[in-house]
Amino acid sequence: MNTEPLNVAGVAGPIVVTTKAVWGHPAVTVGGVPAPRTGKRFALPTVDGGVVQATLRSTIADPYPTLEVNGVKHRTGPVTPILLRILALLPFLLLTVGGILGGLVGALGVGANLTIVRTPMATPVKALAMVGVAIGTVIVWLVVAVALNAAFS
């Protein structure tokens, strides 16, 4: 998923952050050209021909990473309502009752919910879809658990 172009004073072009749906390292481009990466830092070209270091920070509860340039933090997406953040993490509760299997299925549900948060749907529609994913993860967990129990009994 690509973020909207972000204009930062002194940087030679609009910055776009590309994030993966679930796992993987995000990529940063400036004016359509990939920025070199060293760990979590990116070298962004400046208008005077130099480079400025930028750090990309992300958290599990926020679907959009934050880009820090010269000590100034820039959001790469809109602010996510707290209800959607809670709903995004809801499938992780399977870890408490389902053990490792519940955690794995829950992680897939969280990945699906974070993808839903990034879509351009209205907030109530996103919330309903995320509740549906949470219910779906419980159903998948139950089916797999019953199948494994039957296979090893």
Image (cartoon, helix red, strand yellow):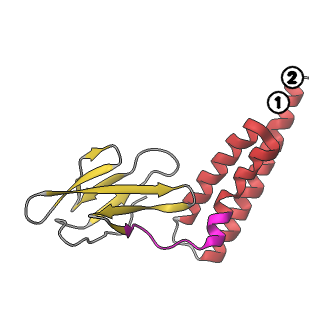
Label 2: how many Cα within 10 Å (few below 14, some 14–19, many 20+)? few
Q: Label 1, on which residue? A: 148
* Residue 76: x %, y % from top left: 40, 66
Q: Is residue 67 left or right of residue 81?
A: left
Label 1: how many Cα within 10 Å (few below 14, some 14–19, many 20+)? few
Label 2: which secondary element: loop
Q: Are marks 1 and 2 in contact (CB under 8 Å)?
A: yes
Instruction: Give the CA separation, mark 1 to mark 2.
Output: 6 Å
* Residue 103: x %, y % from top left: 71, 42
Q: Is residue 48 left or right of residue 22?
A: left
The quarter holding residue 151 reads: top right
Residue 152, which numbered label?
A: 2
Residue 62, which numbered label?
A: none
The quarter holding residue 32 reads: bottom left
Up-down relation of residue 28 to residue 8 (above or below) = above
Q: Amino acid at mark 2?
A: Phe
- Which image quadrant: the N terminus? bottom left
| Residue stretch rendered in magenta on the structure | 74-86
Q: Is residue 77 magenta?
A: yes
Q: Is residue 130 magenta?
A: no
Q: Residue at x 78, y 43 (%)?
A: 141
Q: Residue at x 28, y 63 (%)?
A: 69
Residue furthest out toward the front: 71
Q: Is residue 71 left or right of residue 134?
A: left
User: Count the marks: how many?
Assistant: 2
Q: Residue at x 51, y 71 (%)?
A: 120
Up-down relation of residue 118 to residue 25 (above or below) = below
Up-down relation of residue 127 to residue 1 (above or below) = below
Q: Amino acid at mark 1?
A: Leu
